[in-house]
Each structure stands twice: as structure tokens, then as C-alpha cells.
Image (cartoon, coloured by chain):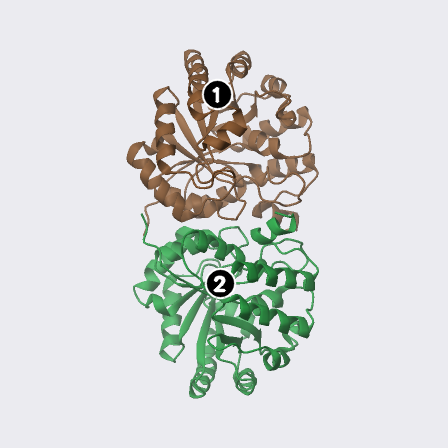
Chain colours: A green, B brown
Amino acid sequence: MNNWPSAVTIKEVGPRDGLQNEAIQVATEDKIHWIDMLSEAGFQSIEFSSFVHPKWIPQLKDAREVAGHIKRKPGIMYAALVPNAKGLEAAIETKVDEAAVFMSASETHNKKNINKTIDETFPVLEEVVQKAKQQGMRVRGYLSTVFGCPYAGDIPAENVITISRRLLDMGVDELSLGDTIGVANPRQVDEVLQKVLENISKDKIAMHFHNTQGMALANVLVSLQHGITTYDSALGGLGGCPYAQGASGNLATDDLVHMLHGMGIKTGLNEEKLKEAALFIQKALGKELPSHQMQILNRGG
Amino acid sequence: MNNWPSAVTIKEVGPRDGLQNEAIQVATEDKIHWIDMLSEAGFQSIEFSSFVHPKWIPQLKDAREVAGHIKRKPGIMYAALVPNAKGLEAAIETKVDEAAVFMSASETHNKKNINKTIDETFPVLEEVVQKAKQQGMRVRGYLSTVFGCPYAGDIPAENVITISRRLLDMGVDELSLGDTIGVANPRQVDEVLQKVLENISKDKIAMHFHNTQGMALANVLVSLQHGITTYDSALGGLGGCPYAQGASGNLATDDLVHMLHGMGIKTGLNEEKLKEAALFIQKALGKELPSHQMQILNRGG
């Protein structure tokens, strides 16, 4: 029998990674109210927005306003994505607790996504990380396409390890290893984590799965077996294909919590309050959310 | 790292456990055509219908006609559910390869489902099993509510072991342990299998999961780690709530196959032919099927 961790930390990324992939623009006041509901539900960490240029992600153009109006509950880390020095300035001005930088484990994806080679990306991130640390902020590093790239296919675990080490060396506190396109299978997660954890402490690693193929919870399971205790997820499974009702997006926080609590693993989250928050954002988006918990709720179960 | 099995057997239960839980009655000729497509896709075992009284399950009232018209491909086991001696007669007359008997691991559920106590059920099943074996049929025993009962809640693993042993002693060739209401979590599956496999050979066990909470693939994963190599599933995730579009039912064959093939585990199934068969039954039912593979297909992915 397995030795499961007794508790895990769930980082709610719905307001950022969820909403940025939805076609409908949620009103700023609704976002603020929703994030306050998330704070009440018991999260220790909420990624509430992204300080990227509104041309890139118009859904999150109100990041400053959101940052200025959400209730900061003591003990919760309020995080935002920060692509560059300009984004960091906004994050500092709005008193964000954690800045998240990002790059890709795939050369092609990195190039397409941020118009730089992997090597060209490091100095840009290093500047951001150093400034953020000087301000006393925590820094998270997102590494995307860890388990597969839409352009390059498979990504060698060695690339993941090399990039991860460089990010940790420049002062990043935590790495989030992302299955950006939802292609990871549990055997692959098992094998990649085996290699990564020979080189990097498990306390530095968070896992970020998407449920495109329905394997996200199975991938979490394998990660739990490797002792990983931080997971990213989005309430209701927000962030699927923008135009498809019920299409799977991010791993759903509510499904993850349901599994973990069923397994006796603590999250600190209140399932009733999560439900209320999911119903609220579902109404604001005007479409049914794809998580299993929401499907059950939506059909009156 | 885990040692995964190199190959598994998938028993397609869509024509029985899937269709019996759909509100729409599929035309007999469509069922026959669909089962022939399943035979072509590479299954070693297909549960094509149930010889129960049509009053109970009107969706499967054409079991005799289906049995008489499907093409029997050599090497495939064509199975049917058989509740009693009368059902077995029909199965014998129509040359079914495998008869499946069923009972519940929960006293209350067994009573509600077949109107007998667990002790009263054994002699009824024993008669069926003996007659079936005399006819050279293979016999499968379904044990339902293994991981939880809607009436009784948790089911002690000891009950599962006791009933399983009695079924094997009376000549049942294989036990299918069912998460009838889709409540099992991976820790529970891990713990139950640990106890069951101390008493019963893993070669006698098949697992039957429903994806109500999205945990079916995670539960398969733990079962694979215990060396279980037979799984029941229904193409497209058929058999969800009859009135809800996209509601999760049985573990979806297509999602299971996608995961297993991704993990390098052989199934003998052709994913293209599975897709065609899923599209065919989706059209016959006139509603979108909930599997992730079908969601991707339905939105043009």
C-alpha cells in the first residue's frame, strides 16, 4: 500500500489560467467578488491575474483594478503572472505577494510564445526575479510544455532539469511543471518525476495538469506517490476550449479536492464554499463548467 | 518507478451496461451493426446484452435478436448478463460464450436490486453457474457496490473477500469488482485490492469503474499497480444519467485505451475503429457522448 502525503497545498489558478482561456470577459466587479469568495474557501495561494499587455490577454486587462480591490486575507499568498520588468513594476505597485515568471521547456514553444530562445529568456527572467526578491516577494517559475509540445513533441527530462536548476539558481522559490496541452500520461509523469527528483528537491516542485484527455487526476495520483504536495488547479475546470460547452480545461479544483478529501488528504478547503464560488463564476460566464462536481450539481445531484 | 503490465484486456460493456442506462432505445439493427463494429475494433470480449425480464430493462428487450444476428468473430468472447435459470436458458439457446451472474457486496443493495439477502442469492447463482459450466460456458461474477453503497455506505473488504471466494468456489471463472455508483477513490481501491489480493489471485479479478467523480482512470492506475490486467469499460462513456447531455457514466473505453496506449500498455484495440464505432452509437443515441476523446472529436479536434 502507498504512503500518501497527509496534506497538500492547492494553488487556485482559475482567475488567471482559467479566465484567460475563456471567450467571455467577466466583469471586474464579478472577478473581485469571486476572488474574495475563493479567499473565504480556504486557499493558501491564489493566482488572481496576470500583468501582461492587454493586447495579449484582453480577459485580464483589469489586473491592476482587481489587485486593488480584492480583500487581502492574512495568510493567503496573492500571486500574479509577470512576463517582464514592466509587469513586475505593476505587481510591486499593487503589492502582489508572489510574482510568477514563465518560460517553456520546448525551444520552439518558447520562441513562439515569448519570441526568444531559451537562452535569451534567462537574463530577462533573472532581472525580474532579482528585483522581485529585493522587494521581498516570493517568486514562482512556470515551466510549460514539460510533458509535450504542440510543435516539438516529446521534451527530454534533461531539458526540464537543466532549466529548472537555472531558475532555482537565480532565486525562484518554486517551480510549477506544466502539462500545457494536456498530453501527459501517468507513466510519463512517473518517469519524468523520477529523473527530476534525483536532481531537485520535491519541496520545490508544484504540478500543473490540464484535463484535456481526462488523465489529470491519474497524473496527480502518480505525483502524490512521488511525494509532491503542491498542485495547481482551476475551480470548475475553467479554461477549456473557449467556444465549447463543457470542454475540459485546467484540472478542476473541486474534483481534485473531492478526490484528496476522499483519500483522507487535507487541503484546508471548505467544499461547500468551493461549490458556492463555482456556481458564482459559472453564472458570470453564462456556461456550464466541465468539472465532474459541477456536472453533478448542474443536474441537481 | 512502477512496473506496469505490458498488456491488458478490455471488456466492452457499452452494449449492456452503457445502453441499459440510456433513456433512448437504440434500434435493434443499429445495435447489431454497432456490436459488429466493436468486434472489428479488436476487443477480445464484448458484453452484448442482458437476458433479464424486459419489464426491468426495456432497453435490452431485444437480447435474443441481437444474439442471433451479430457476427461472431472467432477469438472474441460474446457475453451476456444472466440473472437466473430462465435467463441462462435463453443464453444457451442463443449460443452465448460467457454468462455473467451478479450480486451485491451490500446486503441492502442486494435486497433492493434482486429482492434476496446475500445468503439467499448464492443457491440461485450456484444453479446458474453449474448449468452454464455444464454447457461449456465461461462464467463471470459481477460484484456490485464494492466501494460503497447508496444505502449502506462503506462496504468492508471482508464482505467482498467472503462473497468472492464463494463465487469462485461455485465455479465462477472471473470476478468483476464494481464501483457501481462511482464513489471509489484511489486510496480506497489501493487498500481494498491489497486485502483482496492477499486472498484471491489477481488473474481472477477484473475492475469495473464508473467515472461519476472523474476518478475512474486514477482508480485504474492504482489497479494496474496491483497487477490487475482486466478492465470493464463502455465506449464513449455511455451509461451516464439518461437525461443529462455529457454526464459521466461508465469509464470510457476510448479514454482508457488512450491512456494505456500512451503508457505503452497494449490492448489489441484499433483507436481509429473505436472512434468510428463511438461516432456511430453517438448518432444512434442522438446525444453527445461524455468521453474526453469524444469531446475532442465533437469540437473538431
Instruction: Choose top left, top right, bottom left or bottom right for residue B8.
Output: top left
Q: Position of residue B61 (x, y in %)?
A: 64, 22
Residue drawn at 59 percent across, 38 percent down: B238
Is residue A170 in view from this perspective? yes
Residue A30 in percent (x, y) is at 67, 70
- Residue A230 position, x and y percent, is 42, 65
Q: Secondary structure at mark 2?
A: loop
x 31%, y 31%: residue: B201
Residue on which the image places disc 2 = A269
Label tally: 2
Residue, x 61% and y 19% (percent of image)? B69
Q: Nearer the viewer, residue B101 or A204?
A: B101
Q: Residues within 10 Å of mark 1 (few under 14, many from 20)?
A: many
Near mark 2 (Cα within 10 A), the count class, few <14, some 14-19 or many ≥20, is many
Q: Quadrant of residue A49?
A: bottom right
Instruction: Give the amino acid type for the residue marked by disc 1 in the picture.
Output: Ala
- Classify mark 1: helix, strand or loop: strand
